[in-house]
Amino acid sequence: MDYMTRWGYSVELPEGDAALPPIITAAQFSAITGGVMSSTPERVQAVLDGVSQAVRDWCGWHVAPVLPCEWTGQGEGRMLLLPCLGVRSVTEVVVDGSPRSFEWLPSGIVRLVGSTFPDSWRSVECSFIAGNDATSALAMAVAQIAANSLAATAGVREEHAGQVGITYNQTANGVSGGVRLLDSDYRLLAPYRLETR
């Protein structure tokens, strides 16, 4: 099934999926955290969905998993910039209806061989595969953000009863609950961010 992303390209989703899956599954989250996060499966899934969307929005593309993608746009001179990093392969570049010879880089840069792109919008169609396997640093970052969200009681920062006070986990300075990316999360996710080109 083709799914149009908010970043201007479509992806082919696995059979039965109607939207991008979370970057990590609930099983991966449980394995990374050692199963110590107590919450309902529904809440864990909702948080993983929210964290995945927050990470994707900040990074500017779907990030993970590895998926077949289709993009329509335009190039400049001999070059075009795909709206993705982690490009695994470029299978076809069609310019004004004709397939062209090309070279590509994993950073999403495509260059025509022996010709230039026309000066017209939406004249190029490109098929490619892009994304990351949610392992190591990416999986750890997503799990950490989700764990912070699950551990922070929504709307409650601290409680006091007589001489006893409890301060709860916060998802940002002065904010309890919800999905927030902290400065440390931005640093972990920086390699996956598509800078404005």
Image (cartoon, rainbow, N blue to C red):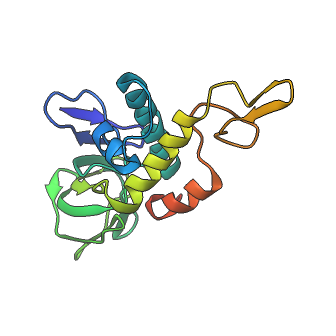
Report whether 114 appears left or right of 150.
left
Q: Residue at x 56, y 54 (%)?
A: 185
Q: Is residue 45 left or right of residue 124?
A: right
* Residue toward you, 83 or 27: 27
If the image is split into quadrants, where does the N terminus sit?
Answer: top left
Q: Residue at x 37, y 50 (%)?
A: 32
User: In the image, 10: left or right of 90?
Assistant: right
**From where the camera sits, is residue 98 visible?**
yes
- From the viewer's perspective, is residue 36 above or below residue 137? above
Task: Please determine whether, in this image, residue 111 is positioned above or below residue 25.
Answer: below
Is residue 197 in view from this perspective? no
Q: Position of residue 106 (x, y in %)?
A: 31, 68
Please count the marks in the image.
0
Q: Where residue 70 sits in the image (x, y, percent)? A: 24, 46
Residue furthest to the front: 163
What residue appears at the point 51 percent right and 61 percent down from the top-left corner?
188
Image-quadrant location for residue 166:
top right
Q: Residue at x 25, y 42 (%)?
A: 11
Q: Nearer the viewer, residue 112 or 66?
A: 66
Q: Quadrant of residue 4?
A: top left
